[in-house]
Image (cartoon, rainbow, N blue to C red):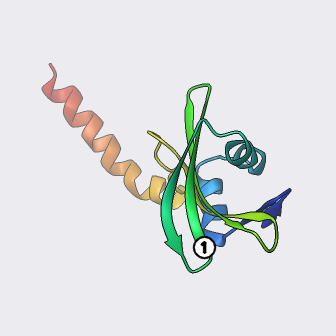
Amino acid sequence: MPSSYKNIIFTKHALERMNKRSISQDKIWQVINHPDKTFNEGSNNKGASKKFIKETGDRKYQVIATYLPNENKYLVISTWVRGEDDKQGIVWTLITLPFKIIWWIVKKLFSK
């Protein structure tokens, strides 16, 4: 995924979170440019950051970004979808699978 899109620059952290959370760069652009709500989040070494919130369908997107006036762009620091967990990696899924199977068997045995 490229580290910039239209008037947005993404941090490495933001790109990782977008990938884990199945959020497209275009969706982040929509949230920043047409938010339902915005909140001041404080300041960092780049300037004042804001939280942008937009609900589309059944997903409530949240983006933390700082406006960079010299570049006329937003720097996206992080992003997530409210109420959703990150996708688990394949390694973690394989490690936990035996425990999930055992737990399922135990629940079936004791439910009878």
Image side of residue 99 versus residue 80, left or right: left
Which residue occupies the extreme right position in the image? 6
Label 1, secondary structure: give it.
strand
Q: Nearer the viewer, residue 103 or 60?
A: 60
Instruction: Please tell me which residue is depicted at 38% across the width and 53% down the height of the picture.
Output: 96
Q: Which amino acid type is shown beneath numbered disc 1?
A: Gly
Q: Quadrant of the C terminus?
A: top left
The percent coordinates of residue 33 (x first, y second) are: 74, 45
Instruction: Please tell me which residue is depicted at 64% across the width and 40% down the height of the picture.
Output: 35
Instruction: Please tell me which residue is depicted at 66% across the width and 71% down the height of the picture.
Output: 12
Q: Residues within 10 Å of mark 1 (few under 14, many from 20)?
A: few
The percent coordinates of residue 84 (x first, y second) are: 47, 41
- 43 versus 22 height, above or below: below
Quadrant assignment, res 70: bottom right
The percent coordinates of residue 3 (x first, y second) are: 78, 67
Q: Nearer the viewer, residue 6 or 14?
A: 6
The percent coordinates of residue 36 (x first, y second) are: 60, 35
Which residue occupies the extreme top position in the image? 112
Q: Quadrant of the N terminus?
A: bottom right
Where is mark 1, residue-wise?
A: 47
- 40 versus 84 height, above or below: below
- 80 versus 107 height, above or below: below
Which residue occupies the extreme bottom position in the image? 45
Image side of residue 49 versus residue 28, left or right: left
Quadrant assignment, res 71: bottom right
Q: Nearer the viewer, residue 23 or 108?
A: 23
- 59 versus 19 height, above or below: above
Q: How many marks?
A: 1
